[in-house]
Image: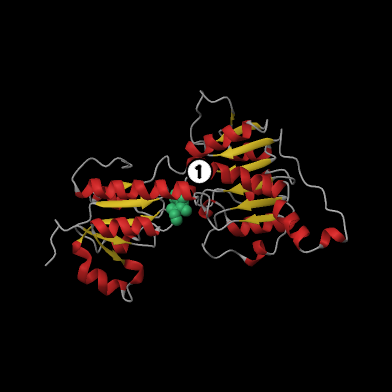
């Protein structure tokens, strides 16, 4: 028989081996992603689970939550909660924890890395050397990064960390976000299209979710100068991907650096075919150091939950 005092944890998707090992040493862990018949498994075992561990990019589907009547915690390996129905968790008193603070620097580093790689054509020129083309022709010219106008869409922790780094490149930093923070020395645009019109580079750093789905669309690409480069380290859902492809194909923008996509791990063939696009497999936070911190935070929160202690990283 299962009771709500059990210490059973449901793992929705694979996590780092050492986190899995720590969880398995301390709790009874079941892996949903390994169940042949997930629905039958949940129908039989669902009431046993008091904690779920999942990833930011995967979240938990609401029909799964509905099979977990004794759930008290969702510990997210990541900061995104866009793949979790927070109305449902609030209504059912389920706490949600995230790995806040752990990944800000890495994601900001990746934003600048993608910007440099796209503008300075690092991947293109790497191929140029490896394929022996340098022996036959001169490399082309790329685009200067330093001193340019950088538009940042979203000025949360990650947006700020990007701005700090861009300041080191003497960029003219400006941003659009829901609210202005007048303590920041950057120009604020209440209107996204106005920001786009004034940006040589445009970095997307807002949170994903229903409110931000498709906000960067044809209107934004048309407003950007045709030499603009678009960088996305946030969520694929924020960008209308077919509009992005059209903008790149038509020359409405000059290039893109992407870590995230609408339907990961699927990446549209059109993007893969483009030389002016740099593609990464959603790895902005994937350094050994940060992933270790994220693992520790997840474990600490699950442990606190089962010890009935305050949750150090609860979101609300
Ligand atoms: C991770 C993320 O890649 O924090 C998030 O929400 O999307 C990323 O940092 C992901 O959660 C782990 O796979």
The secondary element bearing badge 1 is classed as: loop
In the figure, is residue 87 to the left or right of 248? left
Q: Is residue 208 visible?
A: no
Asked whether residue 75 is in view, the answer is: yes
Q: Quadrant of the N terminus?
A: bottom left
At 33% across and 76% down in the image, what residue appears? 36
Taking the spot 53% from the left edge, 38% from the top edge, the residue there is: 159
In the figure, 20 relative to 120: above or below?
below
- Frontmost residue, 215 versus 162: 162
Total residue callouts: 1
**Where, quadrant-wise, is the C terminus in this rendering?**
top left
Residue drawn at (52%, 48%) of the image: 234
- Ligand 1 closer than 8 Å to the CB at disc 1? no
The colouring scheme, among rainbow, by chain, secondary structure or one colour, is secondary structure
**Which residue appears at 67% of the width and 33% of the height?**
169
Q: From the top left corner, tell me how far across and down residue 144 is, in percent.
A: 75, 40
User: Which of the pair 89/266 is nearer the observer?
Assistant: 266
Residue 200 located left or right of residue 310: right
Question: Which residue is situated farthest in the bottom direction here?
Answer: 36
- Image quadrant in which you'd find residue 19: bottom left
Where is residue 68 shown, x and y percent of the image?
A: 23, 61
| Left or right, 292 with reference to 175 | left
Pinpoint residue 239: horizontal percent, then vertical percent. Answer: 56, 52
Judge by depth and name the residue closer to the eye, 108 or 207: 108
Crowding at dot 1, Cα within 10 Å, few <14 / some 14-19 / many 20+, comes out as many
Identify the residue under disc 1.
Answer: 206
Q: Position of residue 300 (x, y in %)?
A: 29, 46
């Amino acid at each position: 028989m299962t009771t709500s005092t059990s210490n059973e944890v449901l793992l929705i998707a694979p996590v780092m081996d050492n986190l899995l090992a720590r969880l398995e040493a301390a709790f009874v862990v079941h892996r949903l992603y390994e169940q042949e018949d997930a629905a039958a498994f949940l129908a039989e075992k669902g009431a046993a689970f008091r904690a779920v561990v999942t990833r930011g990019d995967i979240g938990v589907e609401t029909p799964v939550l509905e099979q977990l009547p004794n759930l008290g915690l969702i510990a997210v390996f990541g900061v995104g909660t866009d793949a979790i129905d927070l109305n449902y968790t609030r209504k059912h008193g389920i706490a949600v924890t995230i790995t806040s603070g752990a990944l800000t620097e890495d994601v900001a580093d990746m934003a600048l890395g993608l910007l440099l790689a796209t503008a300075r054509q690092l991947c293109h020129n790497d191929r140029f050397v490896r394929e022996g083309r340098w022996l036959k022709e001169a490399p082309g010219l790329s685009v200067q990064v330093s001193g340019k106008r950088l538009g940042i869409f979203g000025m949360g922790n990650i947006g700020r960390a990007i701005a700090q780094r861009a300041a080191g490149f003497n960029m003219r930093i400006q941003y659009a976000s829901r609210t202005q923070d007048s303590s920041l020395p950057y120009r604020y645009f209440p209107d996204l299209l106005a920001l786009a019109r004034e940006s040589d580079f445009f970095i997307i750093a807002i949170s994903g979710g229903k409110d931000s789905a498709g906000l960067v669309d044809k209107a934004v690409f048309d407003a950007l100068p045709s030499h603009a480069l678009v960088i996305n380290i946030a969520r694929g859902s924020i960008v209308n991907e077919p509009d992005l492809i059209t903008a790149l194909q038509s020359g409405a923008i000059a290039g893109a650096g992407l870590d995230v996509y609408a339907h990961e791990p699927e990446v549209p063939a059109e993007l893969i075919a483009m030389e002016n696009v740099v593609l990464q497999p959603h790895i902005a936070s994937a350094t050994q150091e940060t992933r270790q911190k994220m693992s520790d935070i997840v474990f600490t929160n699950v442990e606190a939950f089962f010890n009935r202690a305050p949750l150090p990283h609860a979101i609300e």
